Image (cartoon, coloured by chain):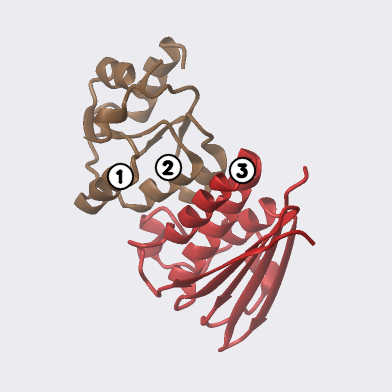
Chain colours: A brown, B red
Amino acid sequence: MTVNEIAKKLNLTFYAGEEIAEKLAKGCYIGDLLSLAMSKVTAENVWITIQTNMNVVAVASLVEAACVIVADGCIPDEKTIEKAKEQDVILLGGEISAFEAAVALSEMGI
Amino acid sequence: MADVMKLQFEVNDGDFTRAGETSSKVKKTLTQLGFSPIVIRKVAIAMYEGEINMVIHANGGTIDVEIYSEKILIVMQDKGPGIADIEKAMQAGFSTADSKVRELGFGAGMGLPNMKKYSDEMEITTEIGKGTCVKLTINVKE
């Protein structure tokens, strides 16, 4: 499953990384505590959070997450978007809740 | 001991915008040098936690990284208040971070425990009013 396919299915907006969204994704982690996310998110995972600050990008980049989905209509800060573009982190967002997103991802076989 | 590569970085106080840059640079270097993804992940997580601690608690400081073929040594020296009770600070969930820091997703009391978890050796020396030095060793052989 590619990040593009996930974005379409979940009706998500691209804040950064649309041009690299043919990247594959598998597995998912949901959480907002960055220390915990850092140890739980593994390479190619989808990470769902409501954190919007730029440290999300640093964590996603370090652990090589496939993409970050900012859920519940939360909107990433401008600086977060800038940093995501700089670091080639795919940043998505939408009205969808973390639970709804997880259910949809599960149905997609992620 | 085989060839060594030494890197040094400054970490600025309160500069959340740049937190993670050091770990990111080291990660890139280790990737270029061909270290395994497991080793790189351990170094990146342990260093990022250290960087964040220096930004949140410790008025910044310096990070020295020594890369050997068989291990990676990270020395993080800060200019902070020191740690009054190391045992307590090592407990998962214990934190002295303020609410502003917690809102950013930090301050869950997992920094030092994560550094321990992702390193093979950890040594903390601290002096109240002077600062703290955390030395981490990550072995390359699993």
> Residue B96, labelled with which disc?
none
> Residue A60, labelled with which disc?
2
The answer to whether any part of residue A32 appears in the image is no
Callout 1 amino acid:
Ala
Residue A110 drawn at (x, y percent):
46, 17
The answer to whether any part of residue B90 appears in the image is yes
State the image quarter where residue B37 is shown.
top right
Q: Does A50 sit left or right of B46 as displayed?
A: left
The chain letter under disc 1 is: A
Callout 3 amino acid:
Gly
Residue A48 drawn at (x, y percent):
39, 34
Q: Give yes or no for contact between labels 2 and 3 (Cβ–Cβ under 8 Å).
A: no
Q: What element carries label 1?
A: helix
Figure check: A50 above or below A7: below
Q: Where does label 1 land, which residue?
A: A84
Q: Where does label 3 land, which residue?
A: B34
The chain letter under disc 3 is: B
Question: CA gap, disc 1 to disc 3?
Answer: 25 Å
